[in-house]
Every structure is written in structure tokens, then in C-alpha cells.
Image (cartoon, rainbow, N blue to C red):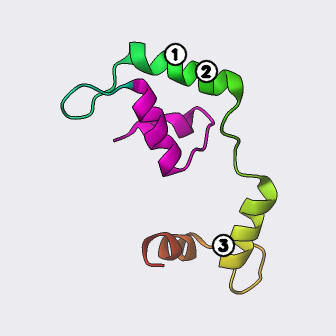
Amino acid sequence: REIGSIIRSLGCFPNEAEVQELLEKIEVEEPGGFVHLEKFLPVMTKVLLDRRFWPIPEDVLLHAFEALDENKCGYITKEDLVKHLTEE
């Protein structure tokens, strides 16, 4: 269940459908969904070498933060960010 976080920590940003597609290629056979490293490495190496999942472009992230900056002050407070991430 943490495979998406692991992949994202490697600088790849797939959506959830793409994570599921990768899991199918890895052939998870263990009960409980454990992934063996020897099955993960070849699939992830190909993903990294092919540069398959690019990071979100900076301008898209900036636009998202501007949308959250309700007061148009150029920043988001920690409290506002927590509110948006947990309540909205």
C-alpha cells in the first residue's frame, strides 16, 4: 500500500491508476500485498530510465498555491494549508 509513496520518493509522480498499472507489472503474489525487491527493481529501473513520470510543472504548482492564497498576500499560512489539506 506504500508503493506509491516509494515511487514518488524517487522523483516520479504517477497518478493512482498508473501506480496500479506498475503493481500489475511487478506481479505482487504475497498475501498482504508485499512487494519483493527483486521484482520491484527491474520495473522501477525501466520507469526511471524511460523518464516515464515527470514531476508536476512549476507553473501548475504555483497556480494551485495562488488559488489557495485567498488574501492574495503571496503566501499561505501553515494553518490555512492544514485547513485546505484536511477539510476542503
Instruction: Give the residue displayed 34% in from the left and 19% down from the top.
Output: 36
Find the magenta span and give its range: 1-26
Residue 16, position in %: x, y?
A: 48, 50
Can residue 4 be seen here?
A: no
| Element carrying mark 3 | loop
- Asked which quadrant contains residue 54, the reply is top right
Residue wearing tag 1: 42
Instruction: Give the residue displayed 54% in from the left and 24% down from the top.
Output: 44
Q: Mark 2 belongs to which amino acid?
A: Lys
Real-space CA distance between mark 2 and mark 3, rounded to the nearest whole angstrom: 38 Å
Residue 33, position in %: x, y?
A: 26, 34
Dominant secondary structure (helix, strand or loop) of the stretch shown in magenta: helix
Check if mark 1's residue and mark 2's residue have beta carbons within 8 Å: yes
Tell me which numbered mark, 3 or 1, is placed earlier along the sequence. 1
Q: Mark 1 belongs to which amino acid?
A: Pro
Front in this rendered view, residue 68 or 14: 14
Instruction: Give the residue displayed 52% in from the left and 75% down from the top.
Output: 84
